Image (cartoon, helix red, strand yellow):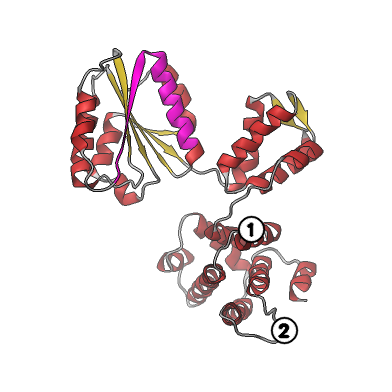
Amino acid sequence: MQLAATQLGPQLQRALKSLYTVHGDEPLLAQEAADAIRAAARAQGYGERTVHTVAGAHFDWSEVLAAGGSLSLFADKQIVEVHIPSGKPGKDGSTALQQLAQSAQGNDSTLTLVMLPRLDKQTRTSAWFLALEANGMTVQVDPVERGALPQWIAQRLAVQGQRVAAGEEGQRTLQFFADRVEGNLLAAHQEIQKLSLLYPAGELGFAQVEGAVLNVARYDVFKLSEAVLGGQPARVQRMLDGLQAEGEAAVLVHYTLAEDIRALKRVKDAVAAGRPLPMALREQRVWGPRERLFERALPRLSATALDNLLHAAHVVDGIVKGLKEPGWPNDAWQALHRLALRLCIECTAQQPGARAKIAA
């Protein structure tokens, strides 16, 4: 049975199962889910814990099967954990996991916890994962997206008895907090805990948060695409500065921006030729959240604007590789800023003042 991470706590209170699988690429939330399962197990007498980490194709799965099928030497009940960092157990592991899943039914002396990274669609339909899902609880740990981050911070503050002011002031405080910790949930958690040490329970002002929360944001070049197409110029500039500071390759940033421009151009041309928009998007392999961003941006982008953006992307490609272009910055990152902000502004409603500023 599948569970969202938010459903795990209520499920553990109702009935502790003998098999849990936690999968996802957010370390903090995965760790918290595992800790909640362990705490519930300890409360019900599972006093011993063994951990098996699958490291490579030559891992001895017989040890895991033996641990799952044996009685604890020091306690009536035991927790057996299987960590698979790669998410690929291999042929022997697939067989062993299916056996573990089947033996979990009716096993009141052993609780098995399987820890996995984020899984692709093919892996989620594999025999071993379906066996885990059918015989126990699978908890999918999804990352907290930027739009949901302020609310997540507010909820975490509430747990420790703190809150921000109501209204616009509070929203400003939460947005500032989110900007400082975006892409780094573990550090966000630590910054929230720091506030509980610095200030008593109650309301936190903007100045208190501004003075206490460090800039620990970590940026993903593919999230930059989301910010650009979503028309978020302030976030785009912040992300570009962060990517440069983290040592990201300028050529990779340019490739991401140029691919978006080319895809927008191809979809726009296909629609102009009579192709239905959903079909044109599928043909360009645009789906999921990116599909919604394209649907929002395309009506605002004229064919002329896309031609100009395509030419600008070609110019910046040369600058990134060391060439100079009249009217453009010689610095690769400055040129990337200009290209990204041009696309960002074109993807929003008409803002003449902002466009004039970017073009200057």
Q: Earlier in the sequence, mark 2 or mark 1?
A: 1
Instruction: Determine the secondary structure under disc 1.
Output: helix
Q: Residue at x 18, y 39 (%)?
A: 95
Residue 152 seen in render = no
Q: Is residue 89 above or below residue 34?
A: below
Placement of the C terminus among the 4 image quadrants: bottom right
Q: Residue at x 25, y 45 (%)?
A: 126
Which amino acid lies under the numbered mark 1 shown in the image of this protein?
A: Gly
- In the picture provided, is 305 more to the left or to the right than 131? right
Residue 295 in percent (x, y) is at: 55, 61
Which amino acid lies under the numbered mark 2 shown in the image of this protein?
A: Gly
- Range drawn in magenta: 29-55
Instruction: Residue under label 1, please give it.
Output: 242
Residue 187 in percent (x, y) is at: 60, 41
Residue 215 in percent (x, y) is at: 68, 48
Spatial CA distance of label 2 from label 1 is 25 Å
- In the picture provided, is 251 more to the left or to the right than 20? right
Pick whichever, 1 or 25, lies toward us.
Answer: 25
- In the picture provided, is 176 more to the left or to the right than 85? right
Residue 220 in percent (x, y) is at: 55, 56
Residue 242 occupies quadrant? bottom right
Pick whichever, 140 or 40, lies toward us.
Answer: 40
Q: Residue at x 72, y 45 (%)?
A: 176
Q: Is residue 202 above or below residue 139?
A: above
Outermost residue, front side: 74
Instruction: Residue under label 2, please give it.
Output: 327
* Magenta-colored stretch includes residue 168: no
Placement of the N terminus among the 4 image quadrants: top left
Residue 320 occupies quadrant? bottom right
